[in-house]
Amino acid sequence: MSRRTFLSLSTAVAAGAAATSLTGCGSGAKKTGEAASSKVKLPSYVPFSKVKPDLPPNVKGLSAGFLSYPKDLVRSVPKTPGDGSKITVLTEIWTQPPLPRDSNAHWKKVDKELGVELTAILGTDPGYEEKFSSTIAGGELPDLLWIPPNQGIQHIAELLEAKCADITEYVSGDAVKDYPNLAAMTPAHWKTAVVNGKIWGAPVPYPAFGQVYAGNPEVWEKADGIQASGPEEFLAKCKEVTGGKTWALEPIYVNTASVMSQCFGAPNKWRQNKDGSLTWFQDTDEYEEALNFVLKLKKAGVFYPGNPKMADANIKMAQGTIGATVHATPFNARQEIRVQDPSVAAEIMIPFAAGGNKPNHHYHLGTIGYTAIKKGDEKRVRMLLGVLNYLAAPFGSKEREFLEYGTEGEDFTYDKNGFPERTKKGKQQVEGLYSGLTTATTSPFALIASAFPGTERAQDVKDVYAAEQKLIETAIQNPVVGHYSDAYTQHYGRMSTEATDLVNDIVSGRKKLSEWKPFWAEWKNKGLEQMAREFQKSIESA
């Protein structure tokens, strides 16, 4: 994924997501989704056990870690899932498009492995919301369609009820064991695919942890590293490393506010109060204190003098022009900078205590959405579930290697350390297609050495794993994950965009911090209170 979308999916303030209205999908869905969604029986959790990681995961979200590439791959799908028919998938790619199917030998092999003739409608970032809307408006729904959690797409409940298959009976409880790779997904993953008390698709697992700062060690060396004991020390370190052609921080102020709000103890998206009511994290004293601290950083001149929507912050960070950038997860913090410069091992900042509060690291949603299935008879729906089960093949399986790298000798070779590397042909044929298919669904996230560029891959896994262990100590969940609010789908896109604009205006000096609380007082009457009531009702029903 691109950095922009990863961050917008991770944070509660999506950068400029447009609200897309889906028409022609019917409006028969009753406005009772929040209550019904709390009662669905989620699929049983059966972890994949044929491949043992070097570093074990745990139920709190710690990722499995693989320090090397398995010598002996295992089978996770015993037979071809497809029935020879044509299927279409609407998904998104985060890299260059692959060669078209007719001139792509790997794509044809994928067809054979899946047992279908696959057509892929590949959206891009930005622009997926427009691709999604135009495809639905075209009248012919794809067999499989990826529904992201936060790209401004509204009226999803109506679309699902009118056009998509309710797969609850096929995957709820032990029924999911018919699809072992889907069964390896946790209840937290499946919660995000529940709407109106029904399960609508295969989740797309994502790292459990949320936004963190990544620092260039060479920049922060003069300040004894990026870690700090509190806001005063962090500000002092930022001043110390800023000078000449180097600035401590990227100018994406909303991301700084999000990470700093963790330090000041702000809740993860919503705070559940003692009486059961909910408070939006930006409408708290802790977030306002964090925003005030961002103002101090701005006045100190430690932000790079660029656009708050700059797209090349990672490049400048790897070059040392910017000292630290915000990333969606600890994994991304190390991996994305390695991509820019394989010699830079970015240091992951652990939130410090601020404002007299303990820090709260914010867990991520757990997925980047789910892929729904077009309505059809049971045989058709089960066949498509089988295809998704194949796409969710875990690391260490033959299916996963084939999907990710293609055919040995043609699309990839093994390097001296046994890691697969795509050839030029593999980059043209495999990379883009895999990007789209893994967006449709994939296996639960793991820290895999081969995912990191450079020569310190095993150490990268160990370092990120160690950072996750530290983050777990203060990590908190978003209390509304797995609960549904019609008002949230209706109003969130506009609210988050306006909040982002106001953060930028305040930090840039165009508006005053005193305008922050009145903004949220106004939004309470424009949908925020309704969101809170609906989420509260769902939580109480559960």
Image (cartoon, rainbow, N blue to C red):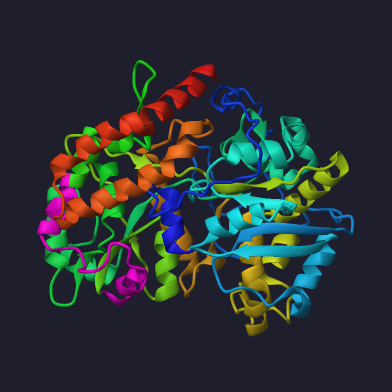
Vertical comparison of 65 with 312: above or below: above
- Direction from residue 497 to residue 187 in the image, left or right: right
Vertical comparison of 7 with 484: above or below: below
Q: Residue furthest top?
A: 275
- Direction from residue 531 to residue 213 in the image, left or right: left
Residue under the point 65% across and 44% down: 24
Does residue 66 show up? no
Residue under the point 39% across and 69% down: 337
Residue under the point 66% across and 57% down: 90
Q: Residue furthest bottom?
A: 424
Quadrant in the picture for the C terminus: top right
Does residue 404 show up? yes
x%, y% of residue 356?
17, 34
Vertical comparison of 65 with 168: above or below: below
x%, y% of residue 83?
89, 55
Vertical comparison of 190 with 404: above or below: above
Residue under the point 38% across and 37% down: 269
x%, y% of residue 169?
77, 31
Q: Which residues are magenta?
A: 292-320
Tell which of 465 and 492 is nearer to you.
492
Task: Tell me, yes or no, whether the highlighted magenta stretch contains residue 299.
Answer: yes
Task: Tell me, yes or no, whether the highlighted magenta stretch contains residue 33.
Answer: no
Tell which of 96 and 262 is nearer to you.
96
- Direction from residue 165 to residue 125 in the image, left or right: left
